[in-house]
Amino acid sequence: MRAAVATGVHEPLALTTRDVPEPGPGELLVKVTACGICYSDLNLLKGEYPFAAFPVVPGHEISGVVAELGPGVSWPEVGTAVGGQFLHDSDGHCDYCARGEPILCPRKRITGVVVDGGYAEYTVLKERFATPLPAGLDPIAAAPLMCAGLTAFNGLRQGGATASSRVAVVGAGGIGALAIRYAVAMGARVAVVARSRRGEDAAKALGAELFVATDDQDPGETLRAWDGGADVVLNAAPSNAPAVAAMSGLAPDGTLVLCGYNTEPFSPPAQLMILNRLHIVANPSGSPHDLRDTLAFSVQHGILPEISTVDLEQAPSVLDAMDAGTAHGRGVITFA
Ligand SMILES: [Zn+2]
Ligand SMILES: [Zn+2]
């Protein structure tokens, strides 16, 4: 099969052929239909995952079809359309796994970072971590929902967003654009915080009522003038500074949700936080039940990301464009 392999930090992706893997006990062989190209894949190549197990096939926004069941596996049957996500598996017995939150498992393993992912014609998923695609979901456009969609949807949930919330989304890229649409569909009022006015029309078309351009507006002041501030600020920008800047726009008891970040120092305003009982929660994608909810909500509300499909051979140039900030829409690898 064709596969792209990350061989080490700052090494280019190697396009190669490999044997089709064999599913072991508890595993499924999945023929990959599509795999989204996530910013985490870029972070892997930049060395931001010290626990990465090179060489590894990247990719954790996997949409595919079950091709073969490992020994003892009876579900989901061959031919079922399934999604594979960031969380490859967990130990299954710790307190977090026991309470249904394997994403918090200290021994969780990450797809495409320590276990081979979806930049290949076939991949192996664990039966307990494969998510059946609901009927009516486009299997190619849905690929980025397995990470970007899950992170945005679950981030809003972790931040306590409801129909009566004011939600400010910082950054309107892959995760941000989905967060805007999920928050609008949840019934929340939505603001978008970005650097320039460039994305204003697009954000308003997605349902945002307020657009804050930090080039010429103070995000804290502007959000506070929005009926007292945001109940939830979701940082979807790949850096910390815009999240900290928007924090002063939180209403009392409000929550900053960190989905995007970088390795720069993160210095939230302690006094402001204490005086207003502000919260910060960081959200690492989600558990399998969160992905089921994300996909069901996406189908119900017709929410799919804007994608551009590419061949496996184009993956390196898409990653370069993402690094240079010139990528448009979410790149999704498809296999004919
Ligand atoms: Zn566990
Ligand atoms: Zn991801």
Image (cartoon, rainbow, N blue to C red):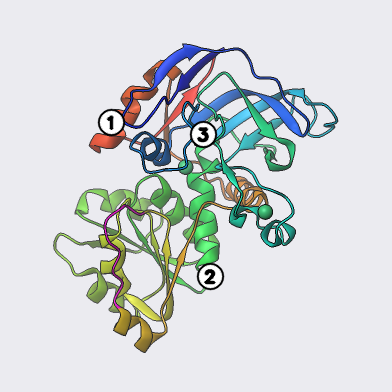
Residue 176 sits inside the magenta stretch: no
Name which of mark 3 and mark 2 comes first in the sequence.
3
Residue denoted by label 3: 112
Name which of mark 2 and mark 1 comes first in the sequence.
2
> Is 1 situated left or right of 47 in this image?
right
Name which of mark 3 and mark 1 comes first in the sequence.
3
Residue at point 85% right, 30% down?
A: 72
Q: Residue 332 is drawn in which quadrant?
A: top left
Residue at point 66% right, 25% down?
A: 30
- Which numbered mark, 3 or 1, is in the foreground of this view? 3
Residue 107, above or below 53: below
Which residues are the magenta region? 261-269
Q: Residues within 10 Å of mark 2 (few under 14, many from 20)?
A: some
Residue 268 sits inside the magenta stretch: yes
> Label 1 sits on what residue type?
Ala
Tags 3 and 2 in contact by the CB under 8 Å rule? no
Numbered disc 3: secondary structure:
loop
Residue denoted by label 1: 321
Residue denoted by label 2: 160
Numbered disc 1: secondary structure:
helix
> Label 3 sits on what residue type?
Gly
CA distance separating discs 3 and 1: 20 Å
Query: From the Cβ of disc 1, is ligand 2 less than 8 Å away?
Result: no
Residue at point 35% right, 88% down?
A: 275
